[in-house]
Image: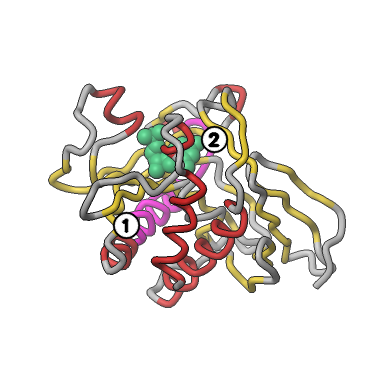
Amino acid sequence: MNKLEQLYEGKAKKVFATEDPNLVIVDYKDDATAGDGAKKGTIRGKGVVNNKLSNNLMKMLAEQGVPTHFVEELSDRETLVKKVQIVPLEVIVRNVAAGSFSKRYGVAEGTVFKAPTLEFSYKNDDLHDPLINHYHALALELATQEEIDTISAYAFKVNEILSKYLLQFNIRLIDFKLEFGRLADGTIVLADEISPDTCRFWDATTGAHLDKDLFRRDLGGEEEAYQEVMKRLLG
Ligand code: C5P
């Protein structure tokens, strides 16, 4: 499968057309941004880690009944995926208070919720991805009720599967963001990526951050942390 014209360049990935109109190639970059694009930098090796980790996790999720866009890993940084129309929702599941939840609601980071919580943001750079509820998503015609139900069920299922899986590697899944897409026939599949860019991973013993918060918060050690997650999960 050959890379044809570039269809899109995002903050962390480029997407290329292929000869097959239903398939595209994703190319992961080392570029990192934070704070709504205010901070820009590079996390060396990040593209390789995110590509390999995301593919590994998506394969595992597909085996357990969550359909995904993943088709085939082509190289360290490139993956063939099904072409989707992205549903413009950032779907965030949280098990433990952190980040914007802690800030918005005044809850100490690390507070464990009695049950996981789900939230949606409207994926829109100009509006800075505002928090919305599912009625807003319907009013804005971002998705149908049926799609929102499917997406919500998949998001909680991903949380259950991933939390259990990561604990084997002594990693606590604090929270994460998913994106879903529609295939040509309308089927909803998990798309985008699952990586230390899009999840909060805390070492289950020490509580150390093993994710992009190291970069966001200028804590340092992000390159090593990304490598550490890859080593734990992929050997
Ligand atoms: O910043 P916040 O606490 O809302 O982030 C919740 C989760 O969603 C974190 O795991 C973060 O990595 C992820 N996220 C993301 N992309 C965004 C916003 C949040 O991957 N634009």
Name the secondary structure under disc 2: loop
Q: Quadrant of ligand 1?
A: top left
| Residue 149 image position (x, y, % from top left) | 37, 52
Is residue 135 visible from the viewing direction of this image? no
| Image mark for residue 159 | 1
Q: Which residues are magenta?
A: 138-159
The residue wearing badge 2 is 123
Q: Amino acid at mark 1?
A: Asn
Q: Main secondary structure of the magenta part?
A: helix
Query: Residue 140: within the magenta?
Result: yes
- Residue at image x 47%, y 31%? 139
Q: Residue at x 17, y 48 (%)?
A: 115
Q: Position of residue 78 (x, y in %)?
A: 69, 63
Question: Residue at 50% across / 63% down in the picture?
Answer: 53
Q: Closer to the N terminus: mark 1 or mark 2?
A: 2
Does residue 88 appear left or right of residue 20 in this picture? left
